[in-house]
Image (cartoon, rainbow, N blue to C red):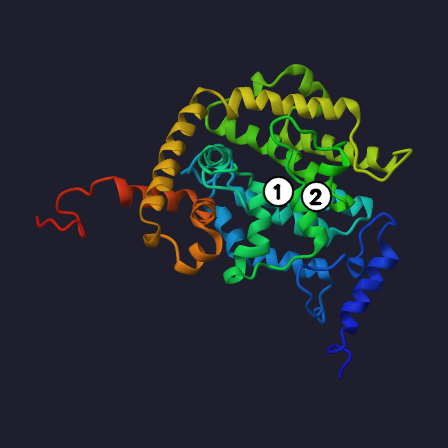
């Protein structure tokens, strides 16, 4: 067998990790493994392989048509769930690189963290929480996608470390990006970096989109937060990233990603401001009602005639509620709107396919 066929190139990359990464970094060669045992790739270490699997997945491609904040935006420059994911990945890699952590593990987690998001962003997630018995959490759905739904029911079979980071990235409305209890904190520093990069990305780009939409003016940002974090998106991201790096490097005890009290509190206060001014304002509430009407209508229709929407094997394997949840959560904004129109909105008289003749 050749050097390539025996995995010699992969072994060289794994050796490079051991030689160059910090002692606190997670090494590909020391992964806890996958749900199903499989042969190692001859070229790529485990976490690089995971990153590639996420990028090539159907769920990742669907993110380009899923809401970040503003439902089904028509403007070219609004963030989608995909561009949010890419910004999280970029910020996470910057932090990981400076801390000499495993960038490929960090990126795999960042790219996969929102695969399970529903259509219509967090508004859609709140709707599904109400509709689905047992509730709905996008991070749990992200795990279900990579474990079960992708690859025609085979899943992506990602490593334990990537799955752990995906499962523990979410902070909700009030959770902190650092300092979580061990039960809710990623076991790797790379997973913790992805968690903090998520909030750094969204509190900044959501301000940009809210200004673009005319919902917010930069002058309305609290002056005390501007004085700590900066007045522009670039300044704020730079402040937060630099703070994470310096505080993590200077920790006197334990191995954990950290932020200073001042910058952490300013970040949390900025998020709280955005919830009041953007995420839960009157316009957002009105859009939530629209999303509820669409998703609840589809949920009811799926339950009335499941055979029209769901495969027999899927129903047999998962049951109606779980299969309907997977179907709804996997929809893009435009697919959900299009299906709703097809099912509930009468076609104009004479339109092709309506059965009426002009």
In the image, residue 237 lies at what x, y percent? 68, 33
* Residue 153 seen: yes
* Residue lying at 64% horizontally and 23% vertically, measured from the top left: 270
Relative placement, left or right, of 284 versus 193 is left
Where disc 2 sits, the SS reads helix
For the question of whether residue 230 can be seen, the reply is no
Q: Position of residue 348 (x, y in %)?
A: 17, 42
Q: Which residue carries the number 1 mark?
A: 87
Residue topped by disc 2: 92
Q: Place residue 85 in its image quadrant.
A: top right
Viewer-proximal residue among 52 and 205: 52
Q: Observer-nearest residue: 341 or 305?
A: 305
Image location (x, y in percent) of residue 263: 74, 25
**122 or 278, nearer to the observer:** 122
- Disc 1 is placed on an element classified as helix
Q: Quadrant of residue 141?
A: top right
């Amino acid at each position: 067998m050749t050097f390539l066929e025996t995995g010699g190139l992969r072994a060289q990359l794994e050796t490079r990790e051991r030689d160059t990464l910090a002692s606190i970094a997670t090494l590909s060669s020391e992964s806890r493994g996958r749900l199903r045992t499989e042969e190692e790739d001859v070229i790529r270490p485990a976490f690089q392989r995971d990153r590639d699997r996420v990028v090539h997945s159907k769920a990742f491609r669907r993110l380009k048509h899923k809401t970040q904040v503003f439902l089904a935006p028509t403007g070219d420059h609004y963030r989608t769930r995909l561009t949010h994911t890419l910004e999280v990945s970029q910020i996470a890699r910057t932090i990981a690189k400076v801390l000499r952590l495993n960038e490929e593990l960090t990126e795999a987690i960042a790219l996969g963290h929102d695969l399970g998001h529903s259509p219509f962003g967090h508004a859609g997630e709140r709707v599904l929480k109400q509709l689905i018995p047992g509730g709905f959490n996008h991070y749990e759905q992200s795990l279900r996608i990579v474990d079960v739904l992708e690859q025609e029911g085979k899943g992506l079979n990602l490593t334990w470390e990537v799955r752990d980071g995906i499962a523990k990235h979410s902070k909700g409305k009030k959770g902190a990006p650092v300092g979580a209890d061990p039960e809710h904190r990623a076991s790797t520093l790379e997973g913790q970096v992805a968690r903090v990069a998520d909030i750094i990305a969204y509190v900044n780009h959501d301000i940009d989109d809210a200004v673009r939409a005319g919902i917010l003016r930069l002058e309305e940002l609290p002056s005390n937060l501007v004085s700590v974090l900066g007045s522009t998106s670039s300044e704020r991201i730079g402040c937060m990233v630099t703070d994470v790096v310096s505080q993590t490097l200077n920790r006197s005890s334990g191995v954990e990603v950290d932020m200073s009290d001042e910058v952490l509190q300013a970040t949390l206060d900025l998020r709280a401001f955005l919830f009041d001014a953007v995420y839960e304002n009157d316009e957002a509430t009105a859009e939530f009602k629209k999303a509820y009407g669409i998703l609840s209508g589809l949920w009811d229709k799926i339950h009335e005639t499941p055979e029209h929407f769901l495969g027999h094997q899927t129903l047999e394997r998962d049951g109606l509620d779980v299969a309907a949840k997977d179907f709804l959560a996997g929809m893009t904004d435009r697919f959900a709107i299009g299906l709703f129109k097809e099912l509930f909105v009468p076609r104009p008289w004479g339109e092709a396919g309506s059965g009426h003749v002009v």
